[in-house]
């Protein structure tokens, strides 16, 4: 399913106010990402798809003297990140807090000068970018030579239970499965090919499997919606038979993926690390 950038922007903006409260998954991935990159010194750092700025709060502790920047497509997220930064400036540890600079920006068209950052990171954002090649090309452009790019995203097999249940629903209702509009995710090999095409080298991956459990399938769908991710993960506008498809999908999910902890939703996370070549494509 093609990713609708306007819907991504709208839905993540709407989710901004409560995003930190419901996104425990993002916190865990952020922790894994912080342990994966290899940079020890960086004067200027960019967090792409910063959301509410959670990754930057952690980076401030690792790089207390660095200039931190965050950008996000959704203005609601930027507004929330700026509000949090203002609160920290007024808090008890204000003297130790160096506020990041936040901008609303598209990952496919970054508003920063070429060769201006020592480190670029992104936590669970690139799976919502329609043209990943353009985004990686932009990251390459804004990085200094030999600077590091480190990111996480949802990989191939994420929400496999949901996708399987939709497939079963379409088959049971004898509806053409080609009309099923759920998102597929990339593999490490796909990412490697794109990164190499745009000039990155020293590419390293780490893959994680993170299962989450829900007492009800509808709660999973509600959480995806609350996270702002539902528009890109599944298209809720199934046409005239939409309610039937959804009900049949839930029935299949409940039948096949119940366990002692509830209903499983599996996230396959890819952590990636790469370096900008001194001479390569994109210069």
Image (cartoon, rainbow, N blue to C red):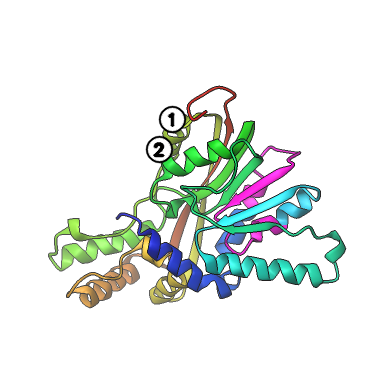
User: What is the span of residues highlighted in magenta in the rendered image?
Assistant: 31-57
x and y, in percent, of residue 210 in the image? 52, 56
Q: Does residue 20 appear anywhere in the picture?
A: yes
> 29 or 141: nearer the eye?
141
Looking at the image, is mark 2 or mark 1 nearer the viewer?
Answer: 1
> Left or right: where does residue 213 sit relative to residue 27?
left
Q: What residue is rendered at 47% in x and 44% in y?
A: 135
Which quadrant of the structure image shows residue 93?
bottom right
The residue carrying mark 2 is 190
The residue at the point 50 percent across, 59 percent down is: 73
Q: Is residue 201 above or below residue 65?
A: above
Q: How many marks?
A: 2
Q: Where is residue 79 drawn, in percent x and y?
A: 60, 69
Q: Which mark is on residue 240?
A: none
24 or 101, nearer to the observer: 101
Relative placement, left or right, of 164 versus 32 is left
Vertical order, 220 against 277 (above or below)? below
What element does badge 1 sit on? helix
| Residue at numbered disc 1 | 197
Instruction: Tell me, yes or no, whether the highlighted magenta stretch contains residue 187.
Output: no
Q: Choose top left, top right, bottom left or bottom right for residue 255.
A: bottom left
Relative to the observer, which residue lies in front, 273 or 74?
74
Q: Position of residue 16 (x, y in %)?
A: 55, 71
Quarter of the image that includes the N terminus: bottom left
Q: Residue at x 59, y 24 (%)?
A: 278
Is 41 within the magenta? yes
Residue density around tag 1, few if under 14, some if 14–19, many if 20 or more, within 10 Å: some
Other-residue count near label 2 (Cα within 10 Å), few / some / many at <14 / 14–19 / ≥20:
few
C-alpha distance separating marks 2 and 1: 11 Å
């Amino acid at each position: 399913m093609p990713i609708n950038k306007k819907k991504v922007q709208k839905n993540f903006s709407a989710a901004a106010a409560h995003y930190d409260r419901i996104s425990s998954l993002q916190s865990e991935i952020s922790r894994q990402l912080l342990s994966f990159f290899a940079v020890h010194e960086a004067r200027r750092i960019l967090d792409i798809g910063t959301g509410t700025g959670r990754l930057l709060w952690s980076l401030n502790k690792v790089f207390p003297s660095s200039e931190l920047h965050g950008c996000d497509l959704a203005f609601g997220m930027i507004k929330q990140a700026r509000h949090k930064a203002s609160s920290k400036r007024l808090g008890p540890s204000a003297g130790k807090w160096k506020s990041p600079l936040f901008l609303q920006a598209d990952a496919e068209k970054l508003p920063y000068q070429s060769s201006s950052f020592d480190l670029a990171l992104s936590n669970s954002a690139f799976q919502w970018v329609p043209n990943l090649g353009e985004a990686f090309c932009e990251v390459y452009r804004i990085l200094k030579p030999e600077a590091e790019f480190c990111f996480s995203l949802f990989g191939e097999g994420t929400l496999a239970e949901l996708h399987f249940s939709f497939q079963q629903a379409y088959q049971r209702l004898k509806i053409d499965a080609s009309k099923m509009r759920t998102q597929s995710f990339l593999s490490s090999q796909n990412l490697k090919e794109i990164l190499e095409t745009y000039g990155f080298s020293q590419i390293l991956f780490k893959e994680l499997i993170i299962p989450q459990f829900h007492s009800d399938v509808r709660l999973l769908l509600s959480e995806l919606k609350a996270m702002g991710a539902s528009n890109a993960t599944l298209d809720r506008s199934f046409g005239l038979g939409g309610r039937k498809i959804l009900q049949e999908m839930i029935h299949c999910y409940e039948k096949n993926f119940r366990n002692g902890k509830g209903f499983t939703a599996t996230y396959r996370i890819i952590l990636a690390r790469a370096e900008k070549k001194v001479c390569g494509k994109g210069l």
